[in-house]
Image (cartoon, rainbow, N blue to C red):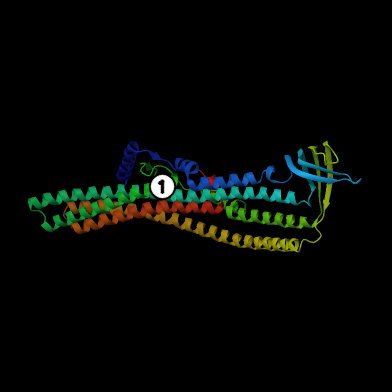
């Protein structure tokens, strides 16, 4: 057993010297910085933040500036009160104006306030959306990461199996040459070596594909070569229990449905505010000038001054749209309350299932470790017996296959248990809180 562990570490560190070792924490950092899905969700969050700005709240006054000029040339005939008539051909009339106006709503039934709070809550909801995207991406990331780790260990195991089969073929060839074994033993050893070679080739190709999958999640060059850290550490039960007790306040799905409930509550209040009157004030500063032809009463005029006013409006009956809006807002709020109850059940179910899957996976891993130890001992004994001629090459091959299957299954069990732990933490809402060191 110690010899196999030593071989593993030597192989791992030799590979590490030849290739970049991508640590789990480094993979997390790269994904958070580069993953396209996360970047898109952050853009959505930025839009929600802009929408929640005071600039989008209608609390600020509206200020407009206007200016204009009008020139008219026409033939005019004017009859005055005293009966005189005056005709001007090509009469020219010019008018100029400019003004700055301000309109500000003092009170609109609190509708602006509720809408502003709703936009703020939608911004908080967008943050939860980013967090959910990050959590889902990290689950995909670690699935891909530990798949690379599993295949790398699989390659290492198959290389050991291939080396054992190669040495067996060499011994069989020598024995056949000296007449101490049959040609059948030699052929069986050659077939087994070819089988192990095929398995190793397929495993290496699967590893290459898995590395490309991981590079896609990291949003980097697909052919970037690297190796990963196959070591995993499981959290203490005390930590897992602590995280489970906090799931109700941290699970992102629960937080999202509660945020939606707040949004619908504010929408209902905003709809009710339409039943109240609104008060607005306005003011302006303007300038106007005109030059008129002889047919006009005035030759010219000039006006400069301030103006101000107030408007009180009350929509007593808005064709029933106000009542319909209030009723629909009530229904939306009731639906959100029902969704919250449903999601609470679903989240608790998923949490319990994830916890059970994790406990089972850890126990399976423990048992598989025992199987590996037993299979190694059995293979070593079988080799000694084969060298002494006490068993056939077929029995030795069976012991070798048993060892191979035990090691591959043990590797699979280790990473399955780690992924089950991460999924459990994800259901607890604690995936981003736990270090992988």
Report the number of numbered marks: 1
Q: Is residue 267 above or below residue 81?
A: below
**Residue at (45%, 40%) from the top-left corner?**
26
**Residue at (21%, 55%) from the top-left corner?**
192
**Residue at (73%, 54%) from the top-left corner?**
270
The local secondary structure at tag 1 comes to helix
Structural crowding at the residue carrying mark 1, measured as other residues with C-alpha within 10 Å and reported as few (<14), some (14–19) or many (≥20): many
Examine the rendering and report whether any part of residue 149 can be seen.
no
Quadrant of the rendered image containing residue 94: top right
Q: Is residue 264 above or below residue 4?
A: below
Q: Is 57 left, or right, of 355 in this rendering?
A: right
Q: Is residue 285 above or below residue 234?
A: above
113 or 34, which lies in front? 113
Query: Where's residue 11, x and y in %?
Result: 31, 41
Pick out the residue farthest to the right.
82
Q: Label 1: which residue?
A: 214
Examine the rendering and report whether any part of residue 100 can be seen.
yes
Q: Is residue 253 above or below residue 215?
A: below
Query: Where's residue 314, x and y in %?
Result: 82, 55
Query: Where's residue 177, x and y in %?
Result: 8, 50
Quadrant of the rendered image containing residue 72: top right
Q: Is 199 left, or right, of 82 in this rendering?
A: left
Quadrant of the rendered image containing residue 222: top left
336 or 98, which lies in front? 98
Query: Where's residue 188, x and y in %?
Result: 17, 57
Q: Is 186 left, or right, of 157 in this rendering?
A: left
């Amino acid at each position: 057993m110690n010899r196999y562990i030593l071989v593993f570490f030597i192989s791992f560190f030799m590979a590490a010297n030849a290739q970049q070792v991508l640590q789990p924490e480094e993979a997390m950092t790269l994904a958070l910085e580069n993953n396209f899905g996360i970047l898109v969700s952050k853009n959505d969050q930025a839009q929600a933040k802009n929408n929640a700005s005071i600039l989008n709240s209608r609390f600020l006054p509206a200020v407009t500036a206007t200016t204009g000029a009008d020139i008219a040339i026409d033939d005019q005939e004017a009859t005055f009160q005293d009966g005189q008539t005056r005709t001007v051909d090509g009469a020219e009339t010019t008018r100029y104006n400019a003004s700055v106006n301000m309109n500000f709503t003092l009170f609109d039934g609190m509708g602006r306030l509720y809408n502003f709070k709703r936009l703020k809550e939608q911004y908080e909801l967008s943050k939860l959306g980013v967090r959910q995207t990050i959590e889902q991406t990290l689950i995909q990331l670690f699935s891909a990461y530990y798949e690379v780790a599993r295949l790398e260990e699989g390659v290492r195991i198959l290389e050991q199996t291939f080396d054992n089969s190669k040495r067996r073929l060499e011994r069989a060839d020598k024995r056949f040459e000296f007449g101490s074994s049959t040609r059948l033993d030699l052929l069986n050893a050659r077939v087994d070596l070819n089988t192990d070679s095929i398995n190793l080739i397929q495993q290496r190709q699967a590893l290459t594909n898995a590395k490309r999958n991981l590079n896609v999640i990291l949003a980097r060059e697909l052919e970037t070569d690297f190796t990963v850290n196959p070591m995993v550490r499981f959290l203490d039960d005390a930590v897992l229990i602590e995280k489970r007790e906090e799931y109700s306040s941290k699970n992102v799905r629960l937080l999202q449905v509660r945020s939606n409930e707040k949004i619908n509550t504010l929408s209902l209040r905003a709809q009710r505010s339409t039943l109240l009157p609104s008060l607005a004030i306005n003011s302006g500063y303007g300038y106007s000038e005109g030059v008129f032809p002889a047919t006009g009463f005035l030759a010219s005029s000039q006006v400069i001054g301030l103006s101000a006013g107030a408007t009180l409006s009350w929509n007593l009956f808005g064709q029933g749209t106000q009542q319909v809006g209030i009723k629909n807002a009530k229904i939306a709020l009731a639906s959100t309350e029902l969704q919250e109850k449903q999601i609470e059940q679903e989240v608790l179910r998923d949490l319990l299932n994830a916890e059970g899957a994790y406990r089972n996976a850890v126990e399976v891993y423990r048992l598989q470790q025992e199987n590996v130890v037993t299979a190694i001992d059995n293979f070593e004994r079988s080799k000694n017996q084969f060298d002494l001629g006490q068993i056939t090459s077929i029995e030795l091959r069976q012991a070798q296959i048993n060892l191979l299957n035990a090691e591959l299954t043990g590797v699979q069990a280790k990473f399955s248990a780690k992924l089950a732990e991460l999924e459990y933490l994800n259901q607890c809402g604690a995936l981003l809180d736990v270090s992988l060191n």
